[in-house]
Amino acid sequence: MTEEAKIYKHADGDGHFRRKDSSFRSFVSRSQSADFPAEKDRYVLYMNYGCPWAHRTNIVRSLKGLESIIQMVATESELGPDGWLFPKEGDPLYGFTLLKQLYLKADPEYHGRYTVPVLWDRKKETVVNNESSEIIRMFYSEFDDLLPEEQREVNHPNGGLYPEHLRPEIDAMNEWVYTTINNGVYKTGFATTQEAYDANVYPLFKSLDRVEEHLGQPGHQPYLFGAHITEADIRLYTTIARFDVSYYLLFKCNLKMIRHDYPRIDLWFRRLYWDQSEKTRGGVFKRTTFFNTYKYGYLKALGRAQGGGAIVIPAGPDPDILPLEE
Ligand SMILES: N[C@@H](CCC(=O)N[C@@H](CS)C(=O)NCC(=O)O)C(=O)O
């Protein structure tokens, strides 16, 4: 195997892809005596527009109106031999060329993968957290004292993105959605044996069937838990946005397509994407969704994993997303 192919090899010896736990797990807190207190201009979100995990953090940052409080830095769209690269001018804090350098500045002994998203603390010059599910919770719960009244979770109708009364249901759904859908597409696409592929592709579609059914139940429209967007919608959205345009073909997730076979999921998806109202702060989902990046970025990575060669871009699906027309 070439050196380059190794970078894109994700599966273990038995052909199964197993995601490693994130390493930095501290929390920003609203309490000013905490190790990482919520402060304006202190934290920086390092992300990549193609990555579905980073996409979650980008959505919540904008949905909460934290753009002027938490700086965001995007890496280049392609992974290099040493991981994510910064644009030519380097990262704005240290002029680093690689995300790896940031990880090693935080911990010279760090041996894990250099993943996005990363929440960086300018003051302590370290990584606070590199787990997207935790970063989004910090974003919507811990920065509220810095935001105008109407943007705080307590003042949102129904209690915000993670309302107290829905927590058990949201947590339960997140669990199977993560295992079989969010991570399921990776386990399917990165499988290097038929056995590993089969073990993941069927549970993935079983779970998509389950989401379709969920959206048909009373109280589960237009969003997964009713009239208001919750964390569960955001976590599912970033995978669905990549499904037809990328995973269907490139990750061999091709038993069904969202647009043709899952009418309720597709309507839910189109409603989020095309929304321009205050609910989405004038279109956060559309503004953070980049279909071309999903089509070409994944294709390049996959082409490399298979040994390189010219990149031929598939024509469909066309259009990237259907119009709203309910
Ligand atoms: N558990 C992490 C996973 C993040 C992750 O896997 N990010 C990918 C991009 S989609 C990455 O940075 N991969 C680079 C690598 O593995 O070298 C999270 O949800 O934050």
Image (cartoon, rainbow, N blue to C red):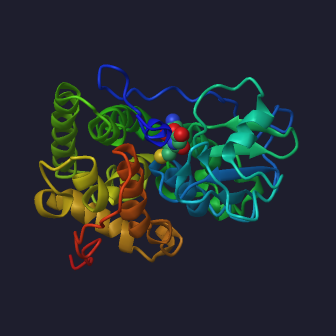
Q: Residue at x 26, y 37 (%)?
A: 188
Left or right of 27? Residue 40 is right
Q: Quadrant of residue 8?
A: top left
Q: Nearer the viewer, residue 60 or 52?
A: 52
Above or below residue 97? Residue 188 is above
- Provide residue 76's location: percent of width, then percent of height: 59, 59
Quick check: 134 left or right of 262?
right
255 lies left or right of 125: left
Residue at 34% x, 40% y is 186
Residue 282's x, y, as percent?
51, 75
Image spot of residue 205 (x, y percent)? 17, 42
Quadrant showing the N terminus? top left
Query: Residue 76, relative to residue 202: is it above or below?
Result: below
For the image, the number of numbered tags is 0
Q: Find residue 271 and report its image quarter.
A: bottom left
Query: Camera-side residue: 187 or 233?
Result: 187
In this view of the protein, can residue 162 be seen by the observer?
A: no
State the residue at coordinates (50%, 51%).
56
Give me the residue at 68% from left, 46% from top: 99
Of residues 258 and 48, which is closer to you in this image? Answer: 48
Residue 127 or residue 139, whichever sits in front: 127
Q: Is residue 265 above or below residue 271?
A: above
Asked if 219 appears above or below 280 in the picture, the reply is: above
Q: Position of residue 218 (x, y in %)?
A: 20, 50
Residue ranking furthest to the top: 14
Q: Is residue 145 left or right of residue 253?
A: right
**Looking at the image, can residue 105 be seen?**
yes
- Quarter occupied by the C terminus: bottom left
